Amino acid sequence: MDTAAFLKTLDYAILKPELGHESLAQAATLCRTAGVGCLCVKSVDVPLAARLLEGSATAVAAVVGFPHGNVHPTVKALEAQLAVAEGAEEIDMVVNVAALKDGDAEAVVRDIRAVVDAAWSFPVKVILETALLTELEMQMGVGCAIAAGAEFVKTSTGFAPQGGATHEAVQILLDAAQGRVQVKASGGIRT
């Protein structure tokens, strides 16, 4: 894979709560210039990001239920629907971690499916927050994402105190996915 192809696989995130329009504009310029595949932003920043990246090859992704996932599925669905209406082409949702830890697969699938349905045909990436999960919970999260129709699972928001992506977590997700859903390492990755 050459550098340009590699850059198209990356998501560049600008999600810290204190980062405003100037930081977003700088990130959009970087993504546009370098050919980064996706700029992931807070849902409130989607309209500006979409304007800044109009005509470029960089997609806009919006986070939903961010950063903790403790939001009613209907609210997550509305946030996803608004983000898509305002220019998001991908949705990164945070799963209901508590439901996952409780072993409530039905609630987790319902949570994810609400967002998948609201995002129309745009890709939904499910952030599992693997630093908070056991191996079995990670496997269950992958199964729920597949059952709900998500296109990706991701390791982390980068906001969990325990850290972001690890090699071990990525391998667990890959083994559980078996090619049925794509896996992205996320959270705490600095390049």
Image (spheres, rainbow, N blue to C red):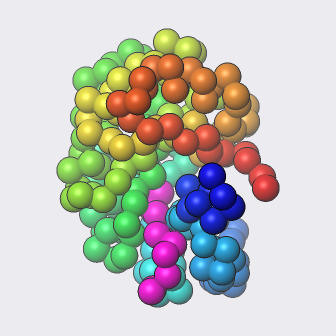
Which quadrant, please, contains the C terminus?
bottom right
Identify the residue at horizontal 57%, vertical 36% (top origin): 155
71 and 140: which one is in front? Answer: 140
Q: Look at the image and say whether residue 23 sits in the magenta stretch.
A: no
Name the foreground residue: 161 vs 9. 9
Residue 10 found in image quarter: bottom right
Q: Which residue, as the protein is rendered here, is positioned at the far front?
A: 2
Direction top: furthest residue: 136
Q: Position of residue 25 (x, y in %)?
A: 64, 83
Q: Indicate the quadrant where residue 123 lies.
A: bottom left
Please tell me whether residue 56 belongs to the stretch shown in magenta.
yes
Q: Is residue 108 left or right of residue 113?
A: right
Specify the segment rendered in magenta: 54-63
Position of 83 with respect to 13 (left or right) is: left
- What residue is drawn where x is 66% and y is 80%? 33
Residue drawn at 69 percent across, 68 percent down: 18
Above/below status of 67 relative to 37: above
Q: Is residue 12 left or right of residue 182?
A: right
Q: Residue at x 45, y 52 (%)?
A: 92
Residue 58 location, x and y as percent? 51, 72
Residue 154: x %, y % from top left: 52, 40
Q: Nearer the viewer, residue 152 or 101?
A: 152
In which quadrant of the rendered view does residue 89 lie? bottom left
Q: Is residue 155 above or below residue 29?
A: above
Say whether residue 117 is visible: yes
